[in-house]
Image (cartoon, helix red, strand yellow):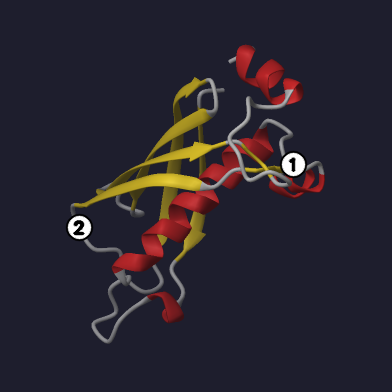
């Protein structure tokens, strides 16, 4: 599985006075996509952190094409772009219920040892899961 998708409905609190999703909320949608992508591989952020591994974002880019609006059902598609040494990179696309592309994004994350705060190679169990893709 190199990609994963799931649906989410835009909540009122995520919009501005025009009923349009506030731009800062897209980072949360991208995070939801990454978390669900990993969960689909039986990799849990909670389990990783419980075992001393963090996965902070070191780069995030977004390209807005059309606005998402209050109560829209969005499809968030997350794609593994690459995984090299200590980094993992994802692309993301967000569509509305009419299958119109609304936003694209790219995020780069680094595996980090929680005790030292330094980058580390992904744990073996993650390497094994990614190797099978």
Furthest-left residue in this view: 65
Tag in front: 1 or 2: 1
Secondary structure at numbered mark 1: helix
Name the image quarter holding the N terminus. Answer: top right
The residue that appears at 79% across and 44% down in the rendered structure is: 47
- Specify the quadrant of the image occupied by residue 41: top right
The residue that appears at 60% across and 36% down in the rendered structure is: 111
- In the image, is residue 4 above or below residue 84? below
- In this orientation, which residue lies closer to the viewer: 2 or 31? 31
Secondary structure at numbered mark 2: loop
Closer to the chain start, of discs 1 and 2, is 1
Counting other residues with Cα less than 10 Å from the Cα at mark 1, is it few (<14), some (14-19), or many (20 or more)? some
Q: Is 86 situated left or right of 71 in this image?
A: right
Residue named by callout 2: 66
Which numbered tag is attached to residue 48? 1
Q: CA distance from mark 1 to mark 2?
A: 35 Å
Q: Position of residue 133 (x, y in %)?
A: 58, 15
- Specify the quadrant of the image occupied by residue 113: top right
Q: Is 20 situated left or right of 112 in this image?
A: left
The residue that appears at 36% across and 74% down in the rendered structure is: 70
């Amino acid at each position: 599985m190199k990609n994963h998708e799931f649906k989410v409905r835009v909540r009122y609190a995520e919009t501005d006075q025009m009923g349009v999703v506030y731009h800062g909320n897209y980072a949360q949608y991208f995070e939801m996509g990454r978390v669900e992508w990993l969960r689909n591989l039986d990799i849990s952020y909670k389990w990783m952190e419980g075992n001393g591994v963090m996965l902070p974002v070191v780069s995030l880019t977004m390209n807005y094409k059309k606005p998402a609006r209050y109560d829209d059902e969005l499809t968030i598609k997350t794609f593994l772009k690459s995984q090299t040494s200590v980094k993992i990179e994802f692309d993301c696309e967000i569509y509305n219920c009419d299958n119109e592309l609304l936003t694209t994004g790219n995020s780069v994350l680094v595996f980090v040892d929680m005790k030292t705060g330094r980058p580390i190679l992904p744990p073996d169990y993650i390497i094994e899961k990614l190797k099978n893709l």
